[in-house]
Image: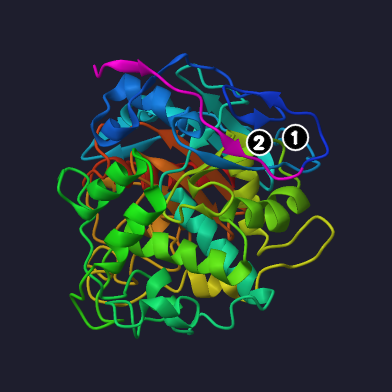
């Protein structure tokens, strides 16, 4: 167990809001998150937290780091689906697991299943509640990807094929020169980045140390601008939180607003999210991190999934995503390392994952042929998920504290794809 230290109050910049707010441990929100844990784990040790510390840290990310608030709109409450989820099962190597087994094996702390926009199943564990703000980790990348689509629709970004240097001319002469936004958002920039979560000297580990100290924005930008080129742009897929950070930075420069503000104005209020959220900020009121750091309630994670499911349609019928944006976002890139024997169509699009059951998986049920084909998965380390399947009109949200940040695909990621496929079958 890591030593737990009392967290200092974190100042959070809040957009203008007409409703009442409360002081929630230094964060002004319309409703204070619960539970309110008094002792928080040290942010600088995030990659080494034990399971107990991870639960507390993930639901208090909004307090452990400086952040910007995005205010909620007028929400319509979810209703219960006529057909409730019973006890779907899946099997691996001849052993069958129930939903209760799955929750334990995946260290699930929250799960929501929405069928046709209605709640077919909801679970909250480890003391989490409907007012818990859980951190997204890299699920935030998919939120940023969606905001990029909106910025293109609004004309704030000219084209997904624009060069990065159109928006950040100071990057001319660096490894990012000649890279397009499409290559950046698909993680095929060719710029070297070490994402190894277990290596204390990786680029990602250095980023987390920047986050735990003052001057975060300048610290991270120094890392990003100092990177070297490893491959020609567009040829090789290599997952990069550094590239995702830069995608968020480009979006903010194009819109003239921090991510939290742009999210609030385009989706959070117009779509009708129920509660305020907080986005991890590197410069309060100016810059929020594009790689992760989106914090919201379980049901609002689900509402975001429903927004994506709709193709970006607001309650008033207005479409705010470009036509066919989701088709483009899930046109899995065919660059080297994105294509494998298990996923011959590729595994990565516009910061969304293809987590279908591998076509070469053996001794599993549901079988690969019964997998949720065409699903788009927002995935974050330690098991954070928003899965959207438009063919089934199905959204699944999962909060977890996996023992490993990024386990082998044959472990928790495979079992998630099997369970979600079993859920889809039962709810048809």
Which residue does the numbered mark 2 point to in the structure image? 119
Tell me the quarter of the image containing the N terminus.
top left
Query: On the picture, is 173 further left or further right than 121?
Result: left
Residue 376 x, y percent position in the rendering: 48, 59
Query: On the picture, is 395 further left or further right than 235?
Result: right
Residue 209 x, y percent position in the rendering: 28, 42
- Of 246 and 414, the residue lying toward us: 246
Vertical comparison of 297 with 137: above or below? above
Within the magenta stretch, is there residue 12?
yes
- Of 155 and 425, the residue lying toward us: 155
- Of 265 and 386, the residue lying toward us: 265
- What secondary structure is found at the residue carrying circle 1? loop
Which residue does the numbered mark 1 point to in the structure image? 79
Q: Residue at x 33, y 53 (%)?
A: 219
Query: On the picture, is 203 further left or further right than 14?
Result: left
Residue span colored magenta: 1-16
- What secondary structure is found at the residue carrying circle 2? strand
Say if residue 353 shows up in the picture.
Answer: no
Q: Residue at x 63, y 36 (%)?
A: 299
Q: For the stretch drawn in magenta, what is the main secondary structure? A: loop
Vertical comparison of 126 with 230: above or below? above
Vertical comparison of 304 with 69: above or below? below
Q: Residues within 10 Å of mark 1 (few under 14, many from 20)?
A: few
Residues under numbered marks 1 and 2 in contact, where contact means CB atoms less than 8 Å apart: yes
Per the model, the C-alpha gap separating discs 1 and 2 is 6 Å
Say if residue 92 shows up in the picture.
Answer: yes
């Amino acid at each position: 167990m890591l030593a737990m230290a009392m967290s200092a109050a974190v100042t959070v910049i809040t957009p203008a809001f007409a409703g009442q707010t409360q002081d929630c441990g230094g964060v002004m929100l319309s409703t204070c998150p619960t539970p309110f844990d008094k002792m928080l784990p040290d942010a600088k040790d995030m990659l080494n937290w034990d399971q107990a510390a991870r639960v507390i840290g993930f639901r208090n990310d909004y307090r452990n780091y400086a952040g910007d608030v995005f205010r909620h709109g007028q929400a319509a409450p979810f209703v219960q689906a006529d057909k409730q989820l019973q006890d779907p099962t899946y099997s691996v190597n001849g052993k069958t697991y129930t939903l209760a087994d799955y929750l334990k094996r995946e260290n699930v702390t929250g799960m929501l299943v929405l069928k046709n926009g209605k709640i077919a199943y909801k679970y909250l564990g480890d003391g989490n509640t409907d007012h818990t703000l859980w951190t997204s980790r890299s699920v935030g990348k998919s939120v940023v990807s969606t905001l990029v689509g909106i910025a293109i629709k609004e004309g704030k970004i000219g084209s997904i094929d624009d060069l990065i240097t159109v928006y950040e001319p100071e990057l001319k002469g660096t490894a990012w020169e000649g890279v397009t936004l499409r290559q950046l958002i698909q993680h095929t920039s060719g710029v070297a980045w070490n994402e190894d979560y277990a290596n204390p000297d990786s680029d990602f580990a250095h980023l987390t140390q920047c986050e735990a100290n003052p001057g975060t924005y300048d610290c991270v930008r120094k890392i990003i601008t100092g990177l070297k080129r490893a491959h020609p742009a567009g040829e090789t897929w290599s997952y990069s939180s550094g590239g995702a950070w830069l995608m968020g930075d480009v979006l903010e420069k194009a819109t003239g607003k921090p991510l939290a503000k742009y999210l609030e104005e385009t989706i959070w209020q117009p779509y009708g999210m129920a509660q305020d959220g907080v986005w991890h900020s590197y410069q309060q009121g100016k810059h929020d991190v594009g790689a992760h750091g989106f914090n919201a309630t379980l049901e609002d994670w689900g509402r975001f999934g429903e927004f994506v499911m709709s193709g970006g349609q607001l309650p008033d019928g207005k479409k705010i995503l470009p036509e066919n944006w989701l088709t483009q976002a899930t046109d899995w890139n065919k660059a080297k390392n994105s294509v494998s024997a298990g996923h011959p169509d590729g595994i990565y699009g516009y910061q969304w994952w293809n987590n279908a059951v591998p076509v070469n998986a053996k001794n599993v049920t549901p079988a690969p042929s019964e997998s949720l084909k065409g699903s788009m998965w927002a995935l974050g380390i330690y098991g954070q998920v928003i899965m959207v399947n438009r063919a089934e009109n199905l959204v699944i949200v999962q909060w977890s504290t996996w023992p490993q940040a990024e386990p082998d695909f044959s472990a928790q990621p495979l079992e998630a794809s099997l369970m979600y496929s079993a859920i889809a079958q039962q709810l048809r």
